[in-house]
Structures are given as structure tokens and as C-alpha cells.
Amino acid sequence: MSETPDGVEVRPYEPGDAAAFWELKRGFELGLGAGTGGDDKLSTYEAKLTDDYRERYLSWVERCATDDPGCVVVAEAVSDGGQSGKSEDATLVGYAFALPEEMTFIWDAAVLNELFLDADYRGSGAADELMDAVLAHARSQDLPLDRIVLDVDEANGRARAFYERYGFDHWGELVSRDL
């Protein structure tokens, strides 16, 4: 697809990424709330981002990344000229999260749980690199059906166009209700 911008590297999630990863996750959640719904939806998404949710979510990410290495990948911008590897000047700018192989029976397929990129890096090619990493990982999983699924809000035109560019099309429909 696109070439990764200079100084951005996609690599597997590491435990030391947790704090920066959480800030990206917050951006993902708040973007869903603000960008695909009214004030009620934003309030709902803001309210769930508690310290307890953060701890539980990051613990789950850690378990997933440990159980199925490569299912969580991050895009890291390195400001010191694009050298590979960890650097004090490295900043996480995005992530993609495919559910671990053990969860493929949920949809009988690989599942792209989340893909998020900081607004400053959108359109740079970094999202393509994240998607390529997720697709490669999904192909390595032992799947009941050779497909990958995801949930995207119909009001999120930018995300829908991105996924359509990768050949995703309508397959079923999620419905929900309050418990």
C-alpha cells in the first residue's frame, strides 16, 4: 500500500509501551464517542475510561500479547533520524490489535479488534503498515475460516474508506441492547 514515513517503525507491543499505549487507546475511545455520535455517546465513552478500566484493559493487552506474540503491534515514531529500536526520543503514534488465535472461534475468523493512529500521522502510510502487520499475523493463525472481520461504525467514513481499500465489505450486522 503506502510506504511507512521516515522515522516510523511498526513492531510488536512490549510491556514498557503500556503508558503510551493507554493514551492512544483513550484517543481511540474518545474519537469513537465524539466522531460517531452525539454528546450522549461521547459521555458514555468518557465515563468508561476509569483507572479500573485502564488497569483491566492493559492487563488484557499484556495477556494477549504474551499468549499470541504479534497480535498487538505499535507504530513508533523515532525523532532521532529513524534508527530502529528503542530510543528516548521514540513516541508511540498508533497501534493495531488483532485478537489472539485462541479467540478466533468467536467469529470463526481472525478479528481486528482495534486500529488507531494519532491524527498527526493519518495519511502518512503508517496505518497501512499497521494493517499489513495485522493481516500477516492473521494469516499465521489457525483459523476456522480464512477471513478477518472487524466492527466499524457506519458514521466513521474515513475508517470505512480505509477498510474498503483493503477489500473489506459488508458481512453481517451487529445489533446490541443494554443489559
Image (spheres, rainbow, N blue to C red):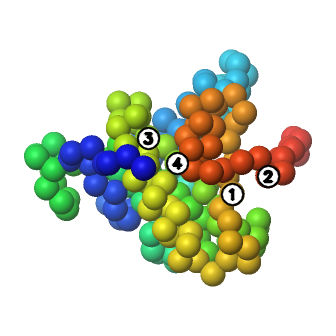
Whether tag 3 and tag 1 are in contact, CB under 8 A, the answer is no
Q: Which residue is mark 4?
A: 115
Amino acid type, mark 2: Trp
Q: Is residue 138 left or right of residue 19?
A: right
Whether tag 1 and tag 4 are in contact, CB under 8 A, the answer is no
Whether tag 2 and tag 1 are in contact, CB under 8 A, the answer is yes
56, 27: nearer the viewer: 27
> Label 3's element?
strand
23, 74: nearer the viewer: 74
Q: Is residue 33 above or below residue 150?
A: above
Q: Which residue is mark 2?
A: 171
Q: Which residue is mark 3?
A: 117
Amino acid type, mark 4: Leu
* Precedes in sequence: disc 4 or disc 2: 4
Residue 96 percent coordinates (x, y)? 49, 54
Query: Real-space Cα distance between discs 3 and 1?
Result: 19 Å
